[in-house]
Structures are given as structure tokens and as C-alpha cells.
Image (spheres, grey):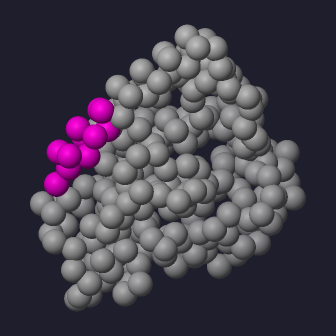
Amino acid sequence: MTTRVKTSIQVISMASAQGRRQQFAATAEHAEIDWEFFSALRLPAAPLAYDEDLTVRRFGRPLKPGEIGCYASHFAVWQAFLDSPAAQLIVFEDDVIVDWQAIRTLAHQDLAAHRIDVLRLFATHPINAKVVKYKLLSDHSHLLRLRGYTYGTQGYMLSKRAAQALVEHSKVMYMPVDWAMSRYWIYGLPHYASFPFPLFERQGQSSIEHSQPAPTSTTSSSVAARFAWRLADRMKRLRFDLAANDRSLFGPPSDAGQAFLTDASSGTR
């Protein structure tokens, strides 16, 4: 029997959001795995810095206060994880309901050993993806390789390698945190997702204040500059995606055999 990997589970929530915290805790009553609240931030702390001019040039508008606080909170979680003895990090926002059986299985498995450094557990919009491993957790759970942006930071899992890459490449804030996280082609680690997602989002606004869209910068020069940057960025993504070789990691996708991580919680395969 192998030793279980140590996984930190952090739930980002405003310290003042006692009602929402109680609601999350009630749904996690039978989690059978340790987790804790991480108090959300409202402003970035060094080494993270917000560059509003660059944000307007690249993203098209300044970030709203809630978006800044959301980014700062997730960045702080990554930093704290890097300073901890845990080998893996699972992050939830406080407005989700979790399939704890699935999370226990994931938490007990060393995903980095399978070269899964970023595992998204939820998305707010349709995703561009392909199946790279059927039967991830069960006969009806599969591993997807994600392409392009994946919106939403309600739930995800990171290895130490991924957290280090994110901290190094995301110190300058110029887009929402889910956009920054999605840019795997910049920090060199492919993104995967467990599907169906092992959590879902409650209806209503999160206590860490996701913001509604705001008008974008529409002068001809700003639009042209933003288009040029996004075109160059897309070419980088396409080069990364073309170089990916998921078959070397997981073999050809086949909907047969046992689930890949079924026995992870017992420490055996």
C-alpha cells in the first residue's frame, strides 16, 4: 500500500460571509476529509500588482473591485500552498455544492505522478475539450484535455508545479483570474477537467464578488492593439496544442476496462 498524498483543500470565502460559510459547512458535514476556509482578499498584496493601463490595453477595460479581490484571493491561496507541506491543492469558492466522494478519490491520488498538474472541476461556460481518458473515477467519469479559455474558478486542483508556474506567470494582474489561469500555453502545463464536474454552483452572487461585464475600450487604436495581441497569443496557444501528445501519457482513449482512479482512496491501484 502506498502512502496517501497530502492534499490541502481551501474554500475561499469572505470572513464576513458567515451565512454563506455556514451554508457551505452544512453541505460538507459528511465530507470525511479535511478542508478549511481561506479568507478572501479585497486588494492585491506583493508580489502581485494590478496594472490598470495594461488591463485596458489587453482586456479592454479596467477590472472591477470584485474581480481584483477574486484574483488576489486565488493568488494568495497559491502562495500559501507553496509554503505548505501539502503536495496538492484543491480550491473551492464558497458558492458550490461538492460531490465529496469524488473529491476524496482525487485528493488521495497523486495526480502529478500522472502528469495532471491542473484539473478543472467546474466551468461557467461551454468548453472546448476532447476525451483523453475514459473512466477516470467511474464508468461515467472521464478526463478531458481542455483547449483555450475555461471560465470560472469555482473549483480546481493544482500540483506544486502548477502553483509555482501560476505564481511566476501571474504576478501582474491585467485580466480576471480565470482568464489568467486558463493560459496554459504561457506557463507550459496542459489543462484537464474531470467530467461530469464533481461540483455545481449555487444560484446567486458569490461572496467574493464576481462582477458583471463593463463597457470595453473601443477607440480604433486600442481595438487594433488588442486584436494584434490576441492574435499573437492565439498563435502561441495553437503551437502548444499541436505539440501536445496525450496518448503518450494516457494511451489511446478507450471506453473499456476499469476506472483509472477507482482504487486511489485505498492507496492501491
Can residue 133 be seen here? yes
Q: In the picture provided, is 74 more to the left or to the right than 193? A: right
Query: Which residue: 26% across, 84% down?
Result: 255
72 up-or-down from 37: above or below:
above
Counting labels gives: 0
Q: In the picture provided, is 255 more to the left or to the right than 75? A: left
Task: Name the image quarter holding the C terminus.
Answer: bottom left
> Where is residue 40 shown, x and y percent of the image?
70, 40
12 up-or-down from 111: above or below:
above
Q: Nearer the viewer, residue 175 or 78?
A: 175
144 up-or-down from 12: above or below:
below
Can residue 87 be seen here? no
Q: In the picture provided, is 238 more to the left or to the right than 223? A: left
Residue 28 forms part of the magenta stretch: no
Q: Nearer the viewer, residue 58 or 186?
A: 58
Query: Which residue: 59% across, 69% down?
Result: 199
Query: Which residue: 76% across, 41% down?
Result: 212
Give the extent of the magenta segment: 235-245
Residue 241 forms part of the magenta stretch: yes
> Where is residue 97 shown, x and y percent of the image?
67, 69
